Amino acid sequence: MKNIVLILSLSFFFAFNASSQEEKINVEAIDNYKYVIVPLKFEFLKDVDKYQINSLTKFLFNKYGYTAFLENDPFPEDLRQNRCLALKTDLVKVKGGFLSTRLQINLMDCNGVIVASSKIGKTREKEFKVAYNLAVRDAFQTFQFYEYNYKPDLKITALPTNVSADTTKQNEEETIVAQEEIERLKQEVAALKEEKVVKQAVIVPVVITSPKKEPIETPQELTEDIKILYAQPIDKGFQVVDKTPKVIMILLETPKENTFIVKDQNAIVYKEDGFWYLSKNDGNATSLETLNIKF
């Protein structure tokens, strides 16, 4: 009899703990966040978008009234400036449950603190692809049946992406260095223009003949698609690719509008008079090149 009582007590204890774990849901807090970012890979899975679980998670958030992006999607301008506007999704595999798959969706703020957690999605399906799909959909009911309504919070909208004191100081120092580098390169570009040694890019001469005059040369811009570059948003900047697509360069954002530092190069890319320019300085010589970049 005592053994029966002990077994029943333990069963109640574990059931209570499991129930408590599922009740740790603060879904109302997500109203203060404008976006949801879904990573390309969850930690418990080996490959990017394994079983299309990441794509499914993004799809479900957008389907039920949220604004979700995969982390490599182009972000809106306000999110690029302040990542704290978004919650990052984490899908975790919950231990326990004999012969069942158990998944839980956590939404974390920009400091990695869990803001809201879903119920634990469960299934006894054996095939992994089907099991993960069903468990995600079951867990998502927490957010599916919640009437999400974005309510801006000044404490969040005013935050920079990195809010720690050390990081803020580091960002300020990097900003000062970037501004000094931009000004130095700008001065060199101005000197180049005065000396009339600026190299003109993507221009070839076209000969026009006249019956009474000598042939003259007129510059004409090239229009081949291969010369066009495309800027794709990434974290804190853009990657510039050609038609292939091949990554040509990485542009890092600076405090100055339409001005970028080229990663791992002593160069900047900036916009002036409606045109984009690449300014380089290798320590021995400076050069200026016109770029045809589509943002």
Image: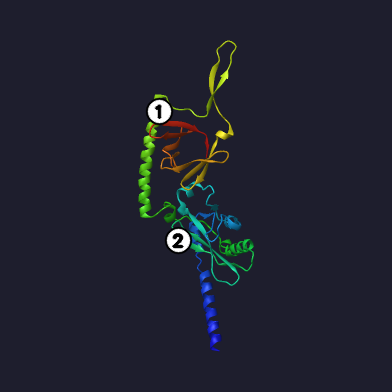
| Three-letter amino acid code of the residue under disc 1 | Leu
Instruction: Tell me the quadrant of the picture where the N terminus can be found.
Output: bottom right
Asked whether 182 or 159 is in front, the reply is 182
Location of residue 171 in the rendering, given as x and y in whole percent from the top left corner: 38, 48
Asked whether 276 or 282 is in front, the reply is 282
* Residue placed furthest toward the top: 212
| Three-letter amino acid code of the residue under disc 2 | Val
* Residue placed furthest toward the bottom: 1
Asked which quadrant contains residue 197, the reply is: top left
Q: Is residue 252 above or below residue 146?
A: above
Using the image, tell me which numbered label, if any, was put on residue 192: 1
Using the image, tell me which numbered label, if any, was put on residue 122: none
Location of residue 255 in the rendering, given as x and y in whole percent from the top left corner: 41, 42
The residue that disc 2 covers is: 113
- Mark 1 residue element: helix
The mark closer to the camera, 1 or 2, is 1
Location of residue 74 in the rendering, given as x and y in whole percent from the top left corner: 53, 47
Q: Residues within 10 Å of mark 2 (few under 14, many from 20)?
A: few
Asked which quadrant contains residue 138, the reply is: bottom right
Residue drawn at point x = 35 percent, y = 46 percent: 173
Q: Do the residues under discs 1 and 2 have CB atoms within 8 angstroms? A: no
Residue drawn at point x = 48 percent, y = 57 percent: 32
- Mark 2 residue element: loop
Precedes in sequence: disc 1 or disc 2: 2
Side of 191 relative to 129 (left or right): left
Location of residue 267 in the rendering, given as x and y in whole percent from the top left corner: 42, 37
Q: CA distance from mark 1 to mark 2?
A: 51 Å
Q: Is residue 135 above or below residue 266?
A: below
